[in-house]
């Protein structure tokens, strides 16, 4: 198996497993840290008598920190190296994770959140850049499918760990910090194979947000629908007549779809000339599924069946969108575009719950489905316009 030459991010002919393991370890730590940290911190704040509005405001720091960290990540990695920057981010995120236990002043949790989620965002961006830069072009979708599957497992493992560890004492914080620190081992071992950024990105950061709009819009929709859906589906489900446990089980089914469709969709994208057609198809399926949700409330089984495939389509936007990005750019441009990709995801996670919640307030319970359908509909229009125009530049 060939090794990428030092100082280049050129893809190899075969999957280079040390690089893949390093990137996957990093994203596993990200998923578990977020999946464990979000419910843990919310429960602790509630036990301390913090008002729900302030809990929500503190939680919103996660998205804002991601949006703030993304524009600077590539410049920092260019100056200090990809692997060293990732190792530094691991140190900051692990120390800040423990900081939540030792610092009890609520207002200090705001800067602590910014440090923690900012460092996690750096890991997110650079692990995706590493895997995209070293993935063989003809197997990029498959490799990113593995990456997306592991990320889904990480997000699912976090709440499971929380249910086992609880919120008392230092143990949940120590476990979270330990998981993050463990990711440093494969990154350190593969540090010689990390892609090298020989030059700074050639464009202003915001230009990268719109450089490959089909990819960045896809992850924006993914972030909006995933975060809004996870936050508000239990309310939609219980108002529609399901019990809390039935609604929670439906969310689990959607998570299963998210997990099992990543690799097949990634492999499919490797055999399609223009990945934008897959992204368009996924959003059309997502649009149809959203429109049918209000009609399925009479049958839990039908709702579960639709959510299984719907969850797969939503997650596919991330995997195929990231693969599309990697097929269009390389080097410093790819690193900056990966940062823009994560930035767009963060914007979606902030916008989604707000828009969907407002729609439910204005139009009633079915507003949940209409708002999600609107997100998908906007993307369908964008992607079709891009395919029809077929711009020569990415």
Image (cartoon, rainbow, N blue to C red):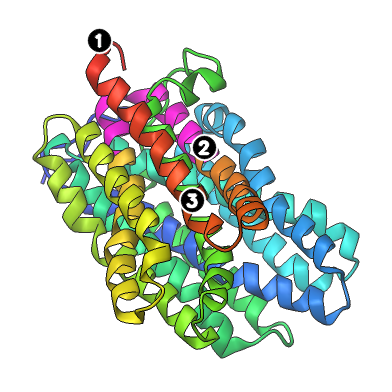
When the figure is inspected, residue 118 is found, relative to residue 36, above or below; the finding is: above
Q: Is 183 drawn above or below residue 389 in the view shown?
A: below
The disc at residue 344 is 2
Image side of residue 133 versus residue 239, left or right? left
Per the image, the residue denoted by label 3 is 370
**What kind of secondary structure does the magenta stretch mostly adopt?**
helix
In the image, the segment drawn in magenta is 323-343
Within 10 angstroms of label 1, few (less than 14), some, or many (20 or more) residues?
few
Question: What is the spatial separation of the Cα atoms under label 2 and label 3, in whole angstroms?
Answer: 22 Å
Q: Nearer the viewer, mark 3 or mark 1?
A: 3
Going from the N terminus, do you reach mark 2 or mark 1 first? Answer: 2
Circle 2 SS class: helix
Residue 102 position in % (x across, y down): 82, 72
Q: Residue at x 55, y 16 (%)?
A: 204
**Apparent side of residue 8 relative to residue 186 in the rendered image (left or right):** left
Res. 258 in view: yes
Position of residue 121 measured from the top left corner of the image (x, y, whole percent): 56, 47
Query: Which mark, residue 392?
Result: 1
Q: Are marks 2 and 1 in contact (CB under 8 Å)?
A: no
Return the residue nearer the eye: 129 or 248. Answer: 248
Label 3's element? helix
Distance between the Cα atoms at labels 3 and 1? Answer: 35 Å
Q: Is residue 178 left or right of residue 107?
A: left
Residue 10, horizontal then vertical, whole percent:
24, 29
Percent position of residue 357, x then y: 64, 56
- Say if the magenta span includes residue 341: yes
Name, please, the residue furthest toward the top. 392
Alpha-carbon span between mark 2 and mark 1: 23 Å
Which of 245 and 112 lies nearest the eye of the viewer? 245
Residue 86's disc is none
């Amino acid at each position: 198996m060939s090794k990428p030459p030092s100082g280049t991010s050129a893809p190899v002919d075969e999957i280079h497993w040390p690089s893949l393991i390093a990137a996957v370890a990093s994203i596993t730590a990200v998923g578990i840290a977020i999946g464990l940290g979000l419910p843990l911190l919310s429960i602790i704040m509630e036990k301390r008598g913090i008002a729900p509005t302030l809990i929500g405001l503190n939680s919103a720091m996660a998205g804002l920190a991601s949006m703030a960290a993304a524009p600077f990540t590539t410049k920092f990695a260019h100056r200090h190296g990809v692997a060293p920057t990732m190792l530094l981010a691991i140190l900051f995120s692990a120390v800040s994770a423990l900081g939540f236990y030792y610092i009890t002043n609520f207002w200090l949790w705001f800067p602590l959140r910014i440090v923690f989620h900012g460092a996690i965002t750096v890991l997110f961006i650079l692990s995706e850049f590493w895997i995209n830069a070293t993935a063989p072009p003809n197997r990029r979708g498959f490799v990113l499918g593995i990456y997306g599957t592991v990320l889904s497992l990480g997000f699912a493992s976090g709440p499971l760990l929380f249910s086992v560890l609880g919120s008392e004492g230092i143990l949940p914080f120590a476990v979270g910090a330990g998981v993050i620190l463990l990711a440093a081992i494969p990154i350190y071992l593969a540090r010689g194979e990390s892609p090298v950024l020989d030059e700074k990105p050639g464009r202003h950061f915001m230009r990268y947000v719109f450089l490959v709009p089909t990819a960045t819009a896809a992850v924006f929709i993914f972030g909006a629908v995933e975060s809004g859906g996870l936050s508000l589906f239990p309310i939609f489900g219980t108002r529609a007549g399901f019990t809390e446990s039935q609604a929670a089980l439906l969310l689990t089914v959607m998570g299963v779809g998210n997990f099992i469709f990543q690799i097949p969709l990634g492999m499919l994208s490797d055999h399609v000339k223009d990945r934008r057609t897959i992204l368009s198809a996924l959003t059309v399926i997502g649009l149809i599924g959203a429109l049918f949700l209000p009609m399925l409330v009479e049958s839990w089984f039908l709702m579960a069946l639709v959510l299984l495939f719907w969850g797969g389509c939503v997650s596919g936007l991330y995997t195929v969108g990231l693969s599309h990005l990697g097929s269009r750019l390389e080097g410093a441009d790819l690193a900056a575009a990966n940062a823009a990709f994560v930035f767009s995801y963060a914007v979606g996670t902030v916008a989604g719950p707000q828009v969907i919640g407002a729609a439910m307030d204005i139009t009633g319970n079915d507003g949940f489905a209409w708002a999600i359908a609107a997100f998908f509909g906007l993307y369908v229009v964008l992607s079709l316009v891009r395919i029809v125009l077929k711009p020569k530049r990415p």
